[in-house]
Image (spheres, helix red, strand yellow):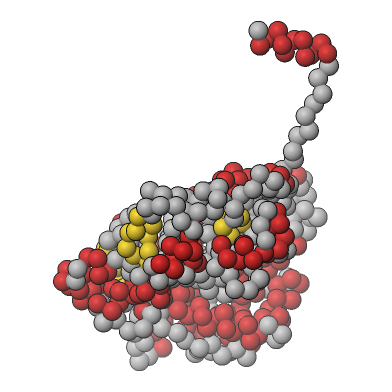
Amino acid sequence: MGITSDPPAGETVVAPPAAPATRDEVVRTALSVFGDSTVGTMADSFGDEPVWDLDVRSYETHDRVEHYVALFSSKARERFTSRLSRGTRYEPMIRAKLRASGMPEDLTYLALIESGYDPHAYSRAAAVGIWQFMSSTARDVGMRVDWWMDERRDPARATDGAIRFLGFLHRQFGSFYLAAAAYNGGPGRVSRGLTRFAEELEGAAGEDRFFALAEQDFLRVETKNYVPQLIAAALVAKKPGQYGLRIDTLPVYEYDSLRVAPGTSLAALATAGSLPGNALKDLNPALLRGITPPDAEIWLRVPVGSAEKLRAAIDTVRPDALRGFRAVRVEVAASASSVASRHGVSLKQLRWFNPNWRISRQGKLTAGQTLRVPTDAALTYARELPDPSLEKFGGAAGTKGLTARGVHVVRRGETLGAIARRYGLTESQLKSMNGLRGTRILAGQTLQIRKSTGADHSVRNVTKAGSSGAPGASGVKGKSQKSRVKKPVKKSGAAKKKAASKVR
């Protein structure tokens, strides 16, 4: 059995073809399942010329394309080979989805360039997953991105989102290469460039329009190089032997699906169903804290052929035995560290399962709230990751909201001591409140803080949405801008009298 979709998402079932004995049967089978582009890849092993469904042949002698072909087959050969090998796990699924949507299958090489087919790829700008989505754009194309679940890490769901986004961009620009440029640099910049240089681009048609626009001093260097990298990747990937590359093949990404209750522990379910190792964790990279979201049932990805066995285990095991936490009520105000210690978990682990706990001005958990205390089994699969909703250039509203709840988002270059001083704490106090042993912190990490009346007011000067290095809220990777704080305007005596008269 091949890739079994989540039923509500309408994903197709794809069975990777078994290799028949003859060359003609191999090509025929590949053509019927994956289309011409995969036939090209298979034919390469027989010495035949591969076939592409993007126009790469017209641009293979372009200087930037030749540069990247040489790079991928020489200095960057080892890294490129590693990425292609990892891609053998996900390419059949990606190609099948692209083909079903009517889009060129060779757009799979965008995922190679973006992340090297790594579901856990995380950029400095907080772009995530195989297709390197920012959280805002991911939500725009239908993915769930929150504390519990980040579907940007799910290869199938992220591919669905990328296809929707690329389809929108292709409809807007009428060119797959311009769509790829907009995926990287933002549709706004590409659109402005086409308008601004309309006269210079006159006579250019189809995919030539990207190269004509790239000759102007308008697109960022990264975006100018993005399409040449895509073309070079397609040229080298389909003729690896010609360039001295040896590609290792990984097991194909495939799964069955099973509907499970909110808050189910992946580790507990795996034990109940006698599944090997980290099978459920590996198939469900979108689940961040070792459990299914506490607020909803979901379709869980399970190893092929194991759904019935797991369903039987669910029906025979007590529900609380599979739940990844127990509920504990805070009867009297207490420090979070003392509550964590009392229940045998670390402060950090308690915070993983209670992102919205309520902290008083005195830095204590307020009485009357109910906390989730994770089980040991759930913790074995939990991932220590920053809040997926946080982006490097996150909007003011989100950052201020976190600060109001007593949470500080670490920015690039900040130190633990500087953050402590900002909120009227000592470094030791801040470490104790967050269960830290050392002083190393990472950008995007959240820290529990004790708010003080003398807190630095520069928190108002947070950055606006901007450069991401990946599709952002509008798909734009523009420059970040600091929000401007307006200075109070001095009113004249006449103006003051006029304002006073309005009050009366």
The answer to whether residue 354 is visible is: yes
| Residue 323 higher or lower than 206, as above or below | below
The image position of residue 184, as x and y in percent, is 64, 59
Establish if 67 lies above or below 429.
Answer: below
Q: Quadrant of residue 31?
A: bottom left
Camera-nearest residue between 67 and 158: 158
User: Residue 96: image x %, image y %?
Assistant: 41, 68
Q: Residue at x 40, y 71 (%)?
A: 344
Q: Nearer the viewer, residue 80 or 294?
A: 294
Q: Tell which residue pokes out farthest to the left in this image.
A: 316
Nearer to me, 111 or 102: 111
Above or below, 395 against 3 in this view is above
- Which quadrant holds residue 438? bottom right
Across the whole image, how many numbered discs are drawn on residues? 0
Which residue is drawn at the image coordinates 59% and 43% (left, top)?
Answer: 397
Q: Looking at the image, can residue 153 be seen?
A: no
Looking at the picture, tell me which residue is in the foreground, 365 or 127.
Answer: 365
Q: Quadrant of the N terminus?
A: bottom left
Q: Quadrant of the C terminus?
A: top right
The residue that appears at 48% across and 84% down in the rendered structure is 43
Q: Position of residue 173 (x, y in %)?
A: 60, 50
* 198 to the left or right of 239: right
Q: Quadrant of residue 343?
A: bottom left
22 with respect to 365 (left or right): left
Residue 347 shown left or right of residue 208 in the figure:
left
Residue 17 in picture, x, y percent from top left: 35, 80
User: Image check: 276 left or right of 337?
Assistant: left
